[in-house]
Image: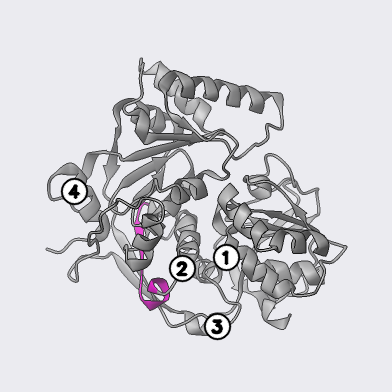
């Protein structure tokens, strides 16, 4: 019987043949904690009587949700986490590098065939590097910090076959929104989603990260792109000594579902309030006034996203009726964007550019919405109250659609600019 890529990853870690549905205790290669969920994970770690983490070189800590600290409780949490990092001798990027998921990938901590866990639901983004990566709760993280392993039920896999080439100003964000709209918010619950086909093999790492990042929005345990030359090139830039190997699903591997998407017929999409799977063509909501546009987050805060926005912006300015907030997802992405001259163009066009962090995405630090306001965002969730007031509205879109809408002051098809 053939195996899927996820079954192969678990089999290699267990040292035996495992299949979807098996419950296993698997060792993990990397764990990540941040400033929101980290304090509780550390508390659970101590409650279990733990003294030292299982392997200090496999734990990564950073702060991104509330940085710089925006309240005394946030400052206190970060102070306590810094103390824990010093005591344990673990790597702490603190507030210096940016959003956790982007930083772990670009620092080379996500590699093909690994099992990676993080105390954050969008940990599944690391699947762009060929890892099985998944978010877990703080109690499970406390256990993993102590033992370096965790119980898993090996998930079944849904195959997403992407074919064709993207039309102008249609992006991987539009594709993943389309996929979520078809599968539904719970249609992939506790399943892995494998992204394959020409559309994905032609896709750059940034686009793959966007798609894997949002696998959780259809309930998936993880999203994964089989590693190929694009993957290895990206990883070798960060870890030159890593040795390539083949890792893919067998031709006779068993998938619980297989869905094909032709991206050549795709048009810009928007997820409308208050669910990510409530996806419509941009034409259906075009003309909706917006008060704030946010381009950033771990989903779409990379240089490639800002390049899309700049191409749409051209010589235009942003509407003076809109607050435009732009936040690169990491220091590395910020510097690439800065050196390309994009930061200056954004500022001159009327945007507020912030240092790398989660920003408005979680609605915990700044960029909050007042009752009755509307946000258009390149982030990953539009739940009620996600970016401020429960009486506000959040729409999700690509960087191209966000830029076009920021120019017009209303939701706009980027192909019209």
Q: Is residue 328 left or right of residue 254?
A: right
Residue at the spot of label 1: 304
Q: Earlier in the sequence, mark 3 or mark 4?
A: 4
Nearest the camera: 53 or 362?
53
Residue 204 numbered mark, or none: 2
Q: Is residue 26 above or below residue 39?
A: below
Residue 167's disc number: 3
Q: Which residues are magenta?
A: 190-201
**250 in relation to 380, above or below:** below
Closer to the N terminus: mark 2 or mark 3?
3
Q: Secondary structure at mark 3?
A: loop
- Quadrant location, the N terminus: bottom left
Label 2 – label 4 distance at C-alpha: 27 Å
Distance from disc 2 to disc 3, alpha carbons, whole Å, reads: 15 Å
Q: Is residue 231 left or right of residue 97?
A: left
How packed is label 3: few (under 14 Cα within 10 Å), some, or many (20 or more)?
some
Q: Earlier in the sequence, mark 3 or mark 1?
A: 3
Mark 2 and 3 residues: CB-CB less than 8 Å, in contact? no
Query: Does dot 4 land on a helix, a strand or a loop?
Result: helix
Q: Badge 4 is on which residue?
A: 12
Residue 345 location in percent, x, y? 76, 64
Badge 2 or badge 1: first in the primary sequence: 2
The percent coordinates of residue 45 (x first, y second) are: 40, 22
Report, in whole angstroms, how far the alpha carbon at label 2 lies from the one at label 1: 9 Å
């Amino acid at each position: 019987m053939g195996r899927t890529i996820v079954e192969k990853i678990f089999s290699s870690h267990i040292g035996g043949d495992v299949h979807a549905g098996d419950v296993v205790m698997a060792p993990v290669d990397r764990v990540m904690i941040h400033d929101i969920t980290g304090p509780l994970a550390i508390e659970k770690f101590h409650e279990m009587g733990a003294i030292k983490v299982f392997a200090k070189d496999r734990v990564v800590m950073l702060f991104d949700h509330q940085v710089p600290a925006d309240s005394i409780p946030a400052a206190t949490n970060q102070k306590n986490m810094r103390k824990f990092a010093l005591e344990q001798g673990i790597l702490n990027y603190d507030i210096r590098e940016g959003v956790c998921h982007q930083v772990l990938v670009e620092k080379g901590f996500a590699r093909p065939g690994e099992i990676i866990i993080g105390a954050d639901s969008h940990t599944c983004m690391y699947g762009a590097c060929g890892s099985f990566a998944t978010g877990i709760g703080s109690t499970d993280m406390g256990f993993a910090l102590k033992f370096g392993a965790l119980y898993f039920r090996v998930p079944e896999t849904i195959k997403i076959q992407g074919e064709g080439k993207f039309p102008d100003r249609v992006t991987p964000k539009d594709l993943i929104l389309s996929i979520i709209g078809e599968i539904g918010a719970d249609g992939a619950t506790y399943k892995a989603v494998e992204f394959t086909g020409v559309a994905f093999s032609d896709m750059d790492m940034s686009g793959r990260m966007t798609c894997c990042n949002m696998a959780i929005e259809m309930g998936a345990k993880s999203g994964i792109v089989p590693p190929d030359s694009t993957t290895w090139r990206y990883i070798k830039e960060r870890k030159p000594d890593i040795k390539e190997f083949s890792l893919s699903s067998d031709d006779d591997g068993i998938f619980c579902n297989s869905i094909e998407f032709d991206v050549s017929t795709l048009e810009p999409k928007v997820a409308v309030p208050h669910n990510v799977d409530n996806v419509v063509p941009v034409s259906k909501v075009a003309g909706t006034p917006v008060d704030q546009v946010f381009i950033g987050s771990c989903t779409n805060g990379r240089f490639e996203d800002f390049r899309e926005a700049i191409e749409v912006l051209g010589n235009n300015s942003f509407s003076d009726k809109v607050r435009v907030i732009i936040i690169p997802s990491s220091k590395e992405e910020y510097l690439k964007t800065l050196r390309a001259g994009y930061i200056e163009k954004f500022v001159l066009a009327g945007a507020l550019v912030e240092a790398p962090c989660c920003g408005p995405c979680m609605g915990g630090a700044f960029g909050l919405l007042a009752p009755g306001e509307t946000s258009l965002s390149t982030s990953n969730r539009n739940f009620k109250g996600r970016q401020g007031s429960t009486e506000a509205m959040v729409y999700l879109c690509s960087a191209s659609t966000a830029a076009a809408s920021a120019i017009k002051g209303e939701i706009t098809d980027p192909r019209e600019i």
